[in-house]
């Protein structure tokens, strides 16, 4: 994963830059959205992973974002006791995915 602002490559083996991640299932597709913070340039990148039930997997970055732009999403993710669980239906998951979960 690279920073969408400066291109710095995060070391995933060390969870470098990783801030928060959440997984959800919508119409059989698994969505995983992960936020990274780049110490080099001070911007956030969102890594989007979509594992389609019928079709190919898509992986694409979004950003760069400022802290103000992602702060609410990151805080919402941190409220979930199991953000990695795509079947979790806590209030944070429901709000984050806009009530669209399976």
Image: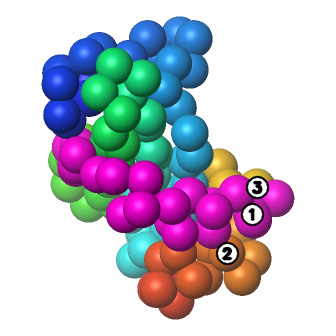
Mark 3 or mark 2: whose residue is earlier in sequence? 3
Mark on residue 80? 1
> Between 25 and 95, which is closer to the camera in this rendering?
95
Helix, strand or loop for disc 3: loop
Q: Contact (CB < 8 A) between labels 2 and 1?
A: yes
Taking the magenta stretch, the answer to whether it contains residue 4 is no
**Left or right: where 30 falls relative to 80:** left
Which residue is located at x 60 percent, y 82 percent?
94
Nearest to viewer (mark 1 / mark 3): 1
Which residue is located at x 18 percent, y 34 percent?
5
> Between 95 and 84, which is closer to the camera in this rendering?
95
Q: Is residue 87 visible?
A: no
Q: Residue furthest right?
A: 81
Instruction: Sort mark 3 into few (<14), some (14-19) or many (20+) by Cα contacts within 10 Å.
Output: some
Up-down: is 59 above or below 78? above
> How far is the residue under mark 3 from the one under mark 2?
10 Å
Which residue is located at x 56 percent, y 58 percent?
74
Residue identified by numbered label 3: 82
> How far is the residue under mark 1 from the one under mark 3?
5 Å
Instruction: Sort mark 1 into few (<14), some (14-19) or many (20+) by Cα contacts within 10 Å.
Output: some
Up-down: is 62 above or below 15? below
Q: Contact (CB < 8 A) between labels 1 and 3?
A: yes
Helix, strand or loop for disc 1: loop
Mark 2 or mark 1: whose residue is earlier in sequence? 1
Chain part drawn in magenta = 60-81
């Amino acid at each position: 994963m690279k920073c969408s602002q400066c291109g710095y490559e995060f070391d995933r083996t060390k969870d470098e830059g990783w801030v928060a991640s959440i997984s959800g299932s919508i119409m059989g597709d698994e969505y995983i959205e992960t936020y990274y913070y780049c110490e080099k340039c001070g911007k956030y990148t969102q890594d989007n992973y979509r594992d389609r039930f019928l079709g190919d997997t898509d992986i694409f970055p979004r950003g760069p974002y400022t802290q103000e732009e992602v702060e609410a999403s990151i805080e919402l993710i941190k409220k979930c006791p199991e953000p990695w669980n795509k079947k979790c239906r806590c209030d944070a998951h429901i709000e984050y995915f806009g009530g669209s979960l399976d």
